[in-house]
Image: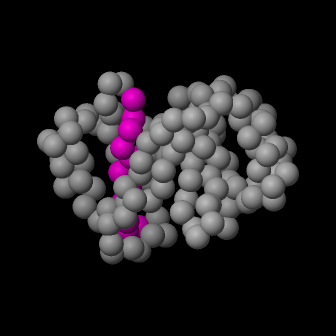
Amino acid sequence: MQLDHVTIRTADIDGTRAFFETVFHLTVGERPAEIRHIPGCWLYAKGKPIVHIIGSRGMGFERAAEAIDHVGFRLEGYAAFRTRLDRLAIPYSTMDLADIGERRLFLRAPGGPLLEAVFSEPVPTLPPENDHDLH
C-alpha cells in the first residue's frame, strides 16, 4: 500500500491551485470524465495526480472552513478488498473511472475520516452486482 493522493476542500479553488503550483511546482492535469462536474482540479507531480482540489461550496457542500477532505491509498486486489469490507460489515461506496482504468472504494474510519482505496484495474463493462452506499 502507498499513499495515492490527498483531497483538499476549499472555498478558494483558484488560490489553492496557484499556491500548490507556485510552492510545490505542481501542474494542473486531466481529471476523469466521470467527475468533471465537481468543481476543482487535479495537480500532478512526475505524471501522477497527487493533490485533488475540490470546492467547499455547492454540490451539496456548504463548509466554510478549509479541510483535508479525504486521503487515498493505492492498493491491489479490488475484489478481495471488497470481500473483506463485506465480511467486516464496513459500509462503502464505489466509483469506477473507466477513462483512467481505476476502481475506487470509499469508506470511513472510526471517528469519521473518509478514506479512499484506489485500484488500477480495468472497469468491467457490466455494473457491479453488489453496490453499496456509504452513509
- Residue 11 in the image: x percent, y percent? 29, 65
Residue drawn at (48%, 39%), measured in percent from left and top? Answer: 3
Q: In the picture shown, does residue 57 fall above or below 80?
A: below
49 in the magenta segment: yes
35 in the magenta segment: no
- Residue 121 in the image: x percent, y percent? 65, 27
Marks counted in the figure total 0
Structure colour scheme? one colour
Please identify the quarter of the rendering in which residue 68 is found: bottom left
Q: Does residue 48 appear left or right of residue 14 in this picture? A: right
- Residue 94 in the image: x percent, y percent? 67, 48
Closer-to-camera residue (65/58): 65
Please identify the quarter of the rendering in which residue 126 is found: top right
**Image quarter in which the C terminus is found:** bottom right
Overall secondary structure of the magenta stretch? strand
Residue drawn at (23%, 54%), measured in percent from left and top? Answer: 16
Q: Which residues are magenta?
A: 48-58
Residue drawn at (71%, 31%), measured in percent from left and top? Answer: 77
Residue drawn at (51%, 35%), measured in percent from left and top? Answer: 2
Kindly tell me whether residue 67 is visible in this rendering. yes
**Image quarter in which the N terminus is found:** top right
